[in-house]
Amino acid sequence: MAWFLNFVHRIAASLRQLGWIDGAWHACARLLQAIPGGRCALHRYQFVAQPVAPGSLCRGRGKAIAVTPCLAAEALPPGPERPLTVLLDRYHQGAQCLVARVGQANHAAPSMAGWLWLLHGACQEDEVRARYVLAPQLSWDLDVWVHPQQRGALVFARLWEEANARLHVQGVRWSCSRISRFNRSSLAAHARLGAINLGTATFVRCGRWQWMFASLPPYLHLSRHPASFPSFRFDHLPWSRHAAT
């Protein structure tokens, strides 16, 4: 009985935080996650695009936070737990990883304060079976992570400050990404950077089967093997009225 009451309390907290629609989806995700074997899961994404423009997001602060590219998976410092196969596949796709480190004067700081991944052309999703195809003026950013000890500081802003500078030089004017609808803090952080919503997609996986339905093309998709996946084409700028210069 105790586990059931604990489960009910978690669901009630999700409903308060996420609202009824996403709260209900989150409850379904937890139920699927509880199925033994880890063969079932539910992911609900919000697609966003944020403008790319050079300039300081930190207003001159955060100079002790160095942001540099890491060119190989083997050179990545200790950070979030990600399968090596996933990291190698990102580099194989041509992704660039920007790593944030805090100055050595702060001995309590982690060796890696955060990272951000950038990709041009197309991105093969590593959480579900899906592909995102991009126009030349667009990039894809993924797996933005900040060490728990550094959250609320300037690491997130410094990562984006450096990413904006690099992308703008390359002719990129918008960076697209997918964010979990269950991660309200990440959605809020991107909104503060000027991100606009492009649509949603929900994926349900059970064994080799995957169901997808979305608010943007291709809307519906069903697959049962790795070579079958939906492709979302971000190949034009329907949000051009917001376009950055």
Image: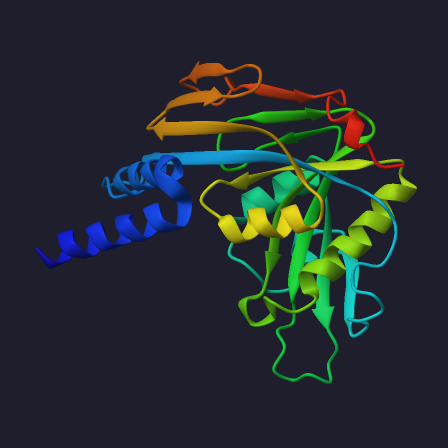
Which quarter shows the N terminus?
A: bottom left
Residue occupying the point 83% across, 30% down: 137
Which quarter shows the C terminus?
A: top right
Residue occupying the point 20% across, 57% down: 6
Residue occupying the point 81% across, 32% down: 243
In the image, residue 73 lies at what x, y percent? 66, 52
Q: Is residue 82 visible?
A: no
Query: Which of the 4 quarters of the picture holds residue 159?
Result: bottom right
User: Looking at the picture, does residue 220 appear above or below residue 134?
Assistant: above
User: Looking at the picture, does residue 73 appear above or below residue 234?
Assistant: below
Query: Which of the 4 quarters of the picture holds residue 103?
Result: bottom right
User: Which of the two residues, 149 or 51, is positioned nearer the viewer here?
Assistant: 51
In the image, residue 205 lies at what x, y percent? 37, 29
Whether residue 216 sits left or right of residue 128 in the image: it is right
In the image, residue 161 lies at what x, y percent? 79, 56
User: Which of the two residues, 171 or 215, is positioned nearer the viewer here?
Assistant: 215
In the image, residue 123 lies at what x, y percent? 65, 31
Whether residue 79 sits left or right of residue 204 in the image: it is right
